Image: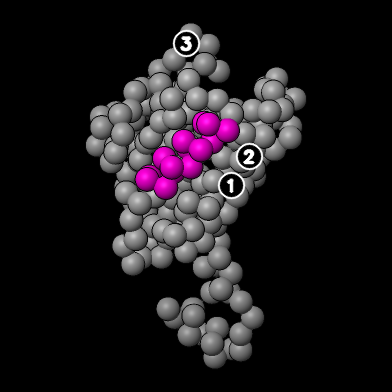
Amino acid sequence: MRFFGADPDLHVLSLAEVDEHGIVRGVYVDRVPKALKGLEALEAASRAWSRLFSLVGYSGDEARCAVEMPDCSYTHRTGARVSDVGNLSAMSGIVLQASRAWVDDAVLVHPAKWKGQVPKHIHQVRTLTKAGVAYQMRGGASPESQYPVPTGYGQFVKTGKVNEGDWKDINDSIGLAIYARDLWLTEQRRKKWAPCNLSELADRLEA
């Protein structure tokens, strides 16, 4: 099984892969020049996301992907412009479409669904800890401005140039990939304990 997470930032595009054990297998990064805005940025991102998924390739293993989709509350909480949220929403659709040729199933998920109301820096620390990745904190003096950077992060980067500051986005991609894995695990548990007759139940318990 392969699980992917995509963070549809407008300029730093990051795709992460974990396996069925939640181990990080790689991150793929591309960029949209900051000089590009609006529709031009979206068009460039569409091409970039297609490249990223083609680099991941199709291995024959079942693959799932979780793509973050902003919600309306984002404008109220962050002061972001409605047009920016609209562009991010369009980006989510672009990522979803780009993934279809390479994964068996992909889902759109709001931030509150996959990480709740946990502050970003805390959730990212939990993500890397869950994945068994050693890290160092970077950023400003206040906890809210900090973020974890994996120790020796070059080992995870499969394509693209990655700077330390990019991990503010990449960490979320890893978290989304782990979320996709957790969804799959929940499905497997439900299948295992679906209604069955007593003989089938006995067989499952023995297995």
Looking at the rendered structure, the kind of residue marked 3 is: Gly
Disc 1 designates what residue? 93
Disc 2 designates what residue? 89
- Give the spatial CA distance, label 3 vs label 2: 29 Å
In the image, taking residue 138 as reference, residue 96 lies left or right, namely: right
Looking at the rendered structure, the kind of residue marked 2 is: Ser
Q: Is residue 69 magenta?
A: no
Q: Residues within 10 Å of mark 2 (few under 14, many from 20)?
A: some
Q: Give the label, 1 or 3, closer to the camera.
A: 1
In front of the other: 62 or 116 = 62
Residue contact at pointers 1 and 3, CB within 8 angstroms: no
In the image, taking residue 95 as reference, residue 21 lies left or right, namely: left
Disc 3 designates what residue? 140
- The secondary structure that dominates the magenta segment is helix
In front of the other: 71 or 11 = 11
Judged from the image, the secondary structure of the residue bearing numbered disc 3 is loop
Q: Quadrant of the N terminus?
A: bottom left
**Mark before the other along the chain sequence, 3 or 2:** 2
